[in-house]
Image (cartoon, rainbow, N blue to C red):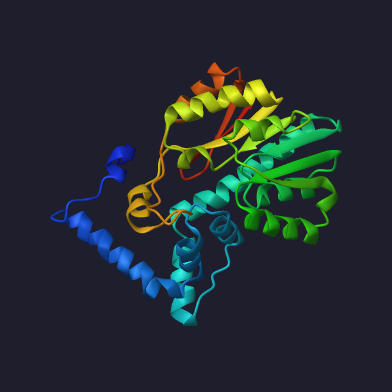
Amino acid sequence: MPLRRMPTFEELLNPLPVYSPKYWYYQFVSFFLRTIGMLSEGIKISYTYGFDSGMIMNYIYRNVPSGRFYIGKVLDRAFLNQVTCKAFRAIKEIQKNAIKDFLKGRNGRPTFIVDLASGKADYVYDALNEVNGHVHVLLRDIDEAVLSESKAIAEKLNLLDKVSYELGDALDLDSLKNIRPNPDLLIEVGLYGIIHDDELIRKHFFHLRDILNPEAILFNVQTYNPQIELIARTLLNQEGERCVWHLRPAEQVIGWAADAGFKDPKVTMDPYGIYAVIMMKS
C-alpha cells in the first residue's frame, strides 16, 4: 500500500487560507486541545514546554496516562496512543539497543560516549543499566533545567559516577572543540528534524568528523509521519512557535554523513515507518 503524500516543509510553514476546510478543521482541533484537552497531562505538558521538548519526551516514554478527572485520563490515554507517541517509544528502545550493541563490541575497553542534544537521555541510562563495562558518558543540552532533571534521574539509578553534564549547543563549533577526549560514540538523536537548513546539517557532519572524529555516530531521521500536518497546525515547539518538523529521506542524511567520512550505515526503522535510527562508523 503506497504511503500517503506528505505536505512539504514549505507547505507546512505557510498558513492555510481561511476558505480551506482544513483551516477550520485545524482551528477546531487547536481550540479543543487548548481548552478541554488541557485536562490531559500530556497535552498540557506539550503546550507548556513544547512538543519537541525533553519534558514531553520523558512523559511519552513513561506511558502512564494522567489528567484531571476521568475525562482527563481518557484524553491522555488517547494522546499517548497516537502513532507519533508510539514511534517515540519505539525509537527509544532501538537507540538503547544500538548503544548496548556498541558497548558489547568494545569488549570491555574503556568507552567515552557523548550525547550532544541529550534531553533527559532515558535511552542512555537504560543502556548503562543493562550493560556492564568501563563507560563514561557526557550529556550535553541547551536546556539547563532538562540537564538538572536528567541528573536527578541518574542519581536515582546510581549512575552519577558514570555521567557528566554540560550546557552546550550541538551546533556551536567553539563548544564542540572543548569536548575532550574525542568520543568513541557520538549521539545526536531528535535533532535534525528541528533543523530546517539542509546545508547546516550537511556541514555539521563535517564539523563532527573534523573536531570530534568519533569511532561511531548514532542519529535518527524522521522520514514520514501521517500526523506531521496535525502537529504543525495545532502544537507548539519549545520557542512557543508552531511545531513544524522537517521530514527527510534517510538516504539523504546518510549521504551527507558519508560525504563527511562516515561509513557502513546500519539502519533500523521503527515499526510505524516514521523514524530511521542509524549507526555509522568513522
Quick check: 68 above or below 218? below
Q: Residue at the location (77% across, 31% down)?
A: 180
Q: Is residue 110 left or right of residue 189?
A: right
Q: Residue at the location (82% across, 46% down)?
A: 162
For the question of whether residue 8 can be seen, the reply is no
User: Would you identify the image quadrant in which residue 273 lies?
Assistant: top left
Q: Position of residue 182 (x, y in %)?
A: 75, 28
Q: Position of residue 235 (x, y in %)?
A: 39, 57
Q: Residue at the location (85% across, 49% down)?
A: 161
Q: Position of residue 39 (x, y in %)?
A: 45, 75
Quick check: 172 above or below 92? above
**Observer-nearest of 156 and 4:** 156
Q: Position of residue 278 (x, y in %)?
A: 58, 32
Locate the N terminus by quadrant.
Answer: top left
Locate the C terminus by quadrant.
Answer: top right
**Observer-nearest of 171 and 149:** 171
Q: Is residue 150 left or right of residue 247?
A: right
Q: Residue at the location (40% across, 51% down)?
A: 243
Q: Is residue 13 left or right of residue 118?
A: left
Q: Find the residue positioned furthest to the left.
A: 19
